[in-house]
Amino acid sequence: MADAFFDGRTPAIRHRPPRLMTAAPILTMGGISRTYGDVQALRSVDVIVYPGEVLGIVGESGSGKSTLLRMMNLEDTPDAGTYHLALPGRVDDNLFTLDRFQRRMLRAHHIGIVYQNPHLGLLMKHSSSGNVAERLLIAGERNFAALRQRAREALDASEFPLTRMDARPSELSGGMQQRVQLAKAIALEPALLLLDEPTTGLDVSVQALVLDTLKTLQRDRNITMVLVSHDLGVIRTMADRVMVMRSGEVVEQGLADQIFQDPQHAYTQQLVHAKL
Amino acid sequence: MNIHTSATPSPAPVLRVEGLSKQFEMHHLKRTLFAFENIGFELNEGEFILLKGENGAGKSTLLRTLYRSYLPRAGHAYYHTREGVIDLAAAADVDIALLRRREIGFVTQFLNARPRVAADEIVAEPLRLAGTPRAKALSEARRWLAAFGVKPQLWPAYPSTFSGGEQQKVNLARALILPQRLLLLDEPTASLDRSARRALVGRLAELKASGVAMIGVFHHPEDVAGLIDREIQLETIRIADGAEEDVAE
């Protein structure tokens, strides 16, 4: 099928020479494909994420970016593809072969996630500290005092006002709800933090505060993050590298400033030029 | 066999650029914009190269290509890292990101900082990323803000509210606080007042003396006249009739 975006001007992905200095990837996904009914949501997607970096994934609605993030969180299994996380003490070849319980334990210990919709990540009728403690309980913490203390620390690191730690998320603003989600996600110091449109729907000043908290966490704790957003400003502020998706495929990836200043692919150029 | 020599060792190379070319593919216009072709030069430790040329000759584009904000079309830029040689034109993004944190700085007049972060925190960030404790990094940041003439009452304020000139000073303090091995300077003195310009040139002289290699574009080259070792003239690409060639088709 002819593709209006491919006009022969996009250079082929160039051969990259061997690494000189960098560490091994923390996340490696290969050939991820997923079809829902007639819709091909992901087409042989490869992803590599290095320790301590923020990988931004951009693309319009339906490009497959959130589906890919759900795969990273082991909420879904692709039709084809492999997933490896470099975790201490684990030698899984392909995490998609794990059963539901194993996936749940892996998530509890090693992967944190913040959803756009706080209802997906939080129990609205539990206290904020209780939401964080729930994550710690799944991971095996049983001592009440320790639960409370660790929940307090995680909320504090997420810049949540501790005077409100016993308030229910349903009583909090959108920005505060996102901080509770964040506290829950980082409570166990995950190897990987997944962020699915974490600031979408927040007003601009709250958005800036949440992004600042994320950046501070990344700097101080060296947390590896994968950030999905359709907001190019958020990606530009946060990401070290950017992956551009369209119709379930990766059309271009590169350093964030290169993607924004010198986009190579026609679709990326269109996307970047459309930024307000 | 031991070889003894009393000759002064030649300065260590930092960067060797060969046949570097850049063009921009503008898909929506179905056009190609040529920036520069077949550039080659060497830059050694402690050396300062001034890039010269008319507007549009590709001076800033060359700096951005070396920093890899732009992807080169052809050629090589062999950079001597502390661990070995890497071709900046082809290196993996993750290697470039690492080099930017540790060895290669880009100094421009424009501040691109996160909103709602205080000026002193912005300036301190490169030190903090390098592992310096917060208090020490902040104290150093304030020293540099003062050196560039940013008033103390502005240090805890958000630079997004500052004038262009003040933002530029914050940006320079941030860019130069952490010594690098290679500095790419894109008109850093443009629109600076005299005292800030003096502070900048003083810092560049200090870095040059410590072995930092620099290549830059200056709107007023006389600002850095005492630092320049060599000049490279970039020519605007022209076609036979003398008109500027910026479109391939």
Image (cartoon, rainbow, N blue to C red):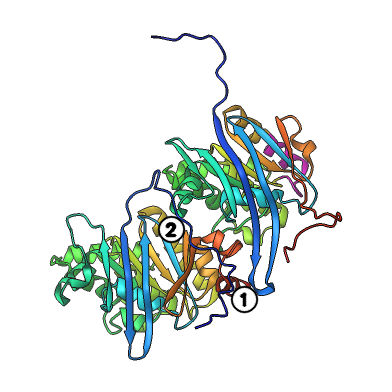
Residue at the spot 37% in from the left edge and 65% down from the top edge: A47
Residue A216 is marked as 2
| Depth check, front residue: A190 or B79 | B79
- Classify residue A75 as left or right of residue A215: left
What residue does disc 1 label?
A274
Please tell me in which quadrant of the rendered image residue B201 appears: top right
Whether residue A214 is visible, yes or no, is yes
Q: Which residues are magenta?
A: B189-201
| Depth check, front residue: A180 or B29 | B29
Chain letter of the residue carrying label 1: A
Residue at the spot 48% in from the left edge and 57% down from the top edge: A14
Magenta-span inclusion, residue B99: no
Q: Amino acid at mark 2?
A: Thr
Considering only vertical position in the picture, is A149 above or below B101?
Answer: below
Residue at the spot 50% in from the left edge and 41% down from the top edge: B103
Q: Dot 1, how many residues are within 10 Å of its Cα: few (below 14), some (14-19), or many (20+)?
A: few
Considering only vertical position in the picture, is B20 above or below A142?
Answer: above
Residue B185 lies, in percent from the top left, at 66, 44
Chain letter of the residue carrying label 2: A
The C terminus of chain A, quarter of image: bottom right
Q: Secondary structure at mark 2?
A: helix
Residue A126 lies, in percent from the top left, at 26, 81
